[in-house]
Image (cartoon, coloured by chain):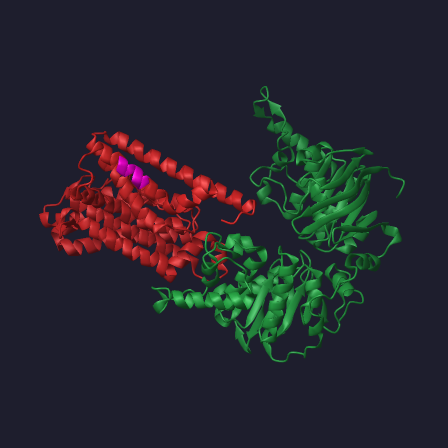
Chain colours: A green, B red
């Protein structure tokens, strides 16, 4: 396929954020009319790279060339002018407008001397674009009424209406059904046939191998390599993605004895749009990790166990007795704590102080007769205890929580659940968005909790966290258990392979 | 600028009071007399009492536009019931009826998940309609003169409404700052989804808030009705705006999560001072409305500045 002419090239492209080198001297190129898969673990720099191409972030250093000429990408507008369209995971569509209006937003055909939108023409033009791509979509339906796959199609049609020569797709199939994935594939191949170049980001390796002409692997902000798809293999790609996973945190914890007493037993558990028929047992003092990429259903499973989203089927036993957990209050009463992955929207109380954030669940117990007269001394005692136990760094108990660093905010949220005296702790992405030092600290805290008998379920999209922290790791792929590892059988390459649906030889 | 806004958050209303006092000293030689001050405080009472309730509503991230109608309904029922069941029972029953509107507001907002603004705007209209129906569209004169004591009587030389204002300040102070319910209210106003996954009953908190607001409106109505000695189905038009002015001027954030009860008390006194001063220099009622509207706009402007600067400061990594 190397006969195609080069369309875009980046030279030593670099972008850093405070404390992170997100994209590090990347030389990358895309040829006309090719599908170019871009793969890598979370945090490898894929998203930053495409956001630079999309004009969202200006690069700190390096050049971007199109057709051999240097071009600027200072805004999304300039990126579009260079005929590049980026389709992000969180779509850029207006839900209350029709499909046709979304495709031509800002460029609607006008009538009456430019005063009114010519809806007839708008709909005809939109229908033409959809027809060329064989998209079965009604141009008049509202975007809020159509499925995720159909929204994806609208985004593609919008890109095509801009006459784009390069379309970047960020995990287009992560939340789609098998049938929808097929349809998107057809469309993507159709685009290639028309000479459009496509950068295709996916966590599912088999998709990359089915679609792509070339594949680029990124790791830790750098490009590892670009290969022709015919001259590489899945296991080679996985090797490039993983690199050397440094066992930095818990080398010494490897010799822990196997835990015995079961605390939480889950059998045949299903959650709508997330997981099917999942069974596992969480023992006392054990750290159990669920691994899975977007679309694996891991988050849905953990949210459902705490009663945030309803379960479809399944049995749960806690300390041997069958229990029903329909609401978070049920879980808390049993002694299950929960730390959200979405600190900003579902965790922090931004207007309130650290102290108030910490004690919000248990405040009734800290109040005389549970109603009036908060016992300030007791409350301050809980604060002081958690502050030293979790080593929270802050100016004082009355400092507003939003002025703490991400790591310290996360410690406060962990402290909030610990104050409920829970026996099991569910954590989603416990170290998302916090710096390396604080990550290690959170890991240490979780390990200490487990050593003192706390049972922990967590999920993470960071490989070192999944490899080093848990005693037991279950991998889900498209809602089903596909692999299982213990500390003894843990193998980072097999773990990554299982997460992206490449399960041969990955049995525990 | 950030320092100024931080100071404003804490002491802003004090500046307003100082400016108001200067204005009053300028227009009236009698301002510094005890009588004048007591008069201003007594006139501040009903605004302050409903303001305490509104502070709670804003802290919960909500809003209550129905306070005026609740006052009218309570007023009408008092006028009708006093001759039948006597003053104490009439007050009790009417205040209960007024508070029930809060249950309705709370249920609709919490269970049907209707926006508080829309909900209370609708109930405001409905309740005003009910009040007019019950009263037959007329004002109802109350013959029992003893009823006037609550609004105009004095105890140890101090007007009764001032005692009521102090009592409610104390009550709400405990609820807002020293009760678990108050903490939950602020938490709901700060981040509702976080409170939900903390296993707390958000709906119950919201219902409680609207009952409390309705209760304050009903009590304020007792004061007003007693002062006028008339059951008024269209009581105090525009009062809800005055209460909002008081609450926002007092430093309670429209964004929820943070209430400032001291600020509300002082702002109520400040607004009372404006009214007093404007009356004294014979400014027409229409201009008084204009003045309150301007003060509200100013308070909202400064609140907006405060929020924007706080965000900017956070974005720049400045510790506030």
- Percent across and percent down for residue A122 are 63, 30
Q: Is residue B105 visible?
A: no
* Snapshot quadrant of residue B248: top left
The overriding secondary structure of the stretch rendered in magenta is helix
In the depicted view, which residue is nearer to us: A400 or B286?
A: A400
* Residue B223 appearing in the image: yes
Vertical side of B169 occupied by A121: above or below: above
Rendering quarter of residue A408: bottom right
Report the number of discs: 0
**A35 and A467: which is toward the camera:** A467
Q: Residue at x 52, y 52 (%)?
A: A403
Quadrant housing the C terminus of chain A: bottom right
* Up/down of B225 relative to A507, above or below: above
Residue B291 pos. (x, y %): 30, 33
In the rendered structure, the answer to whether residue A48 lies left or right of residue B94 reads right
Residue at far top of view: A113
Q: Is residue A90 above or below residue A502?
A: above
Coordinates of residue B259 in the picture (x, y in percent)? 38, 50
- Nearer to me, B6 or A436: B6
Q: Position of residue A179 (x, y in %)?
A: 71, 52
In the image, residue B17 lies in the stretch drawn in magenta? yes
- What segment carries the magenta color? B16-22
| Magenta residue check for A390 | no
| Camera-side residue of B273 and B171 | B273
Q: Residue at x 71, y 61 (%)?
A: A463
Q: Which corner quadrant holds the N terminus of chain A? A: top right
Q: Which residue is at 64% across, 29% downward?
A: A107
Quadrant hosting residue B301 = top left
Residue at 34 percent across and 33 percent down: it is B294
């Amino acid at each position: 396929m190397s006969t195609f002419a080069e369309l875009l090239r980046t030279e030593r492209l670099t972008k850093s954020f405070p404390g992170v080198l997100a994209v590090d001297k990347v030389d990358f190129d895309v040829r006309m009319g090719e599908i170019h898969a871009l793969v890598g673990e979370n945090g490898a720099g894929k998203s930053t790279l495409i956001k630079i191409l999309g004009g969202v972030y200006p690069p700190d250093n390096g050049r971007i060339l199109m057709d051999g000429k240097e071009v600027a990408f200072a805004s999304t507008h300039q990126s579009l002018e260079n005929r590049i369209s980026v389709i992000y995971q969180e779509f850029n569509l207006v839900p209350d407008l029709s499909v046709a209006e979304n495709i031509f937003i800002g460029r609607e055909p006008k009538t009456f001397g430019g005063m009114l939108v010519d809806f007839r023409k708008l709909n005809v033009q939109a229908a033409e674009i959809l027809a060329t791509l064989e998209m079965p979509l009604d141009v008049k339906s509202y975007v809020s009424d159509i499925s995720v796959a159909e929204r994806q199609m609208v985004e593609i049609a919008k890109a095509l209406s801009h006459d784009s020569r390069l379309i970047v797709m960020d995990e287009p199939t992560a939340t789609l059904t098998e049938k929808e994935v097929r349809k998107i594939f057809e469309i993507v191949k159709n685009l290639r046939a028309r000479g459009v170049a496509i950068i295709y980001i996916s966590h599912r390796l088999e998709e990359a191998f089915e679609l792509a002409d070339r594949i680029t692997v990124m790791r830790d902000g750098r490009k590892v390599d670009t290969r022709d798809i015919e001259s590489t293999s899945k296991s080679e790609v996985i090797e490039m993605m993983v690199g050397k996973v440094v066992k930095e945190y818990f080398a010494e914890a490897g010799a822990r004895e196997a835990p015995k007493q079961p605390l939480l037993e889950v059998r045949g558990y299903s959650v709508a749009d997330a997981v099917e028929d999942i069974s596992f047992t969480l023992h006392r003092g054990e750290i159990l990790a669920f691994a899975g990429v977007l679309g694996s259903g891991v988050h849905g499973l953990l949210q459902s166990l705490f009663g945030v989203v309803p379960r479809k089927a399944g049995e749960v036993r806690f300390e041997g007795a069958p229990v029903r957990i329909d609401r978070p209050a049920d879980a808390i009463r049993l002694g299950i704590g929960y730390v959200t992955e979405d600190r900003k929207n579902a965790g922090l109380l931004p207007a309130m102080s650290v102290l108030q954030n910490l004690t919000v669940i248990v405040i009734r117990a800290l109040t005389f007769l549970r109603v009036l007269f908060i016992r300030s001394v007791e409350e301050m005692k809980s604060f002081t205890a958690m502050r030293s136990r979790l080593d929270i760094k802050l100016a004082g108990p009355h400092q507003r929580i939003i002025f703490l660093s991400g790591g310290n905010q996360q410690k406060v949220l962990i402290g909030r659940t610990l104050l409920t005296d829970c026996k099991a702790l569910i954590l989603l992405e416990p170290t998302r968005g916090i710096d390396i030092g604080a990550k290690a600290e959170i890991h240490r805290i979780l390990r200490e909790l487990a050593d003192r008998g706390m049972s922990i379920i967590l999920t993470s999209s960071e490989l070192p966290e999944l490899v080093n922290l848990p005693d037991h790791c279950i991998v889900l792929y498209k809602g089903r258990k596909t692999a299982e590892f213990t500390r003894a059988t843990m193998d980072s390459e097999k773990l990554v392979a299982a997460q992206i649906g490449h399960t041969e030889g990955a049995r525990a | 600028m950030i320092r100024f806004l931080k100071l404003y958050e804490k002491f802003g209303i004090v500046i307003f009071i100082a400016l108001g006092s200067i204005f009053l000293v300028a227009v009236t030689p009698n301002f510094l007399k005890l009588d004048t001050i007591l008069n201003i405080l007594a006139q501040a009472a009903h605004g302050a009492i409903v303001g305490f309730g509104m502070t709670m509503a804003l802290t919960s991230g909500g809003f209550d536009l129905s306070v005026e109608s609740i006052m009218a309904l309570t007023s009408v029922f008092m006028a009708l019931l006093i001759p039948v069941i006597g003053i104490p029972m009439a007050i009790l029953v009417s205040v209960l009826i007024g508070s029930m509107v809060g249950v309705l507001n709370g249920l609709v907002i919490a269970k049907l998940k209707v926006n508080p603004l829309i909900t209370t705007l609708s109930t405001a209209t409905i309740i005003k309609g009910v009040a007019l129906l019950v009263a037959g569209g007329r004002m109802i004169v109350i013959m029992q003169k003893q009823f006037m004591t609550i609004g105009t009587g004095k105890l140890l030389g101090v007007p009764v409404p001032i005692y009521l204002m102090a009592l409610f300040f104390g009550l709400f102070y405990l609820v807002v700052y020293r009760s678990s319910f108050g903490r939950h209210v602020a938490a709901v106003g700060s981040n509702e989804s976080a409170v939900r996954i903390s296993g707390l009953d958000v709906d119950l908190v919201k219902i409680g808030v609207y009952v409390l607001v309705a209760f304050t409106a009903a009590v304020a109505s007792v004061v007003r009705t007693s002062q006028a000695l008339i059951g008024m189905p269209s009581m105090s038009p525009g009062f809800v705006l005055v209460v909002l002015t008081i609450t926002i001027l007092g430093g309670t954030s429209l964004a929820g999560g943070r209430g400032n009860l001291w600020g509300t008390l002082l702002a109520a006194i400040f607004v009372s001072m404006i009214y007093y001063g404007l009356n004294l220099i014979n400014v027409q009622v229409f201009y008084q409305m204009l003045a309150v509207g301007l003060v509200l706009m100013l308070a909202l402007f400064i609140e907006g500045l405060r929020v924007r600067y706080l965000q900017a400061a956070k974005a720049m990594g400045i510790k506030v």
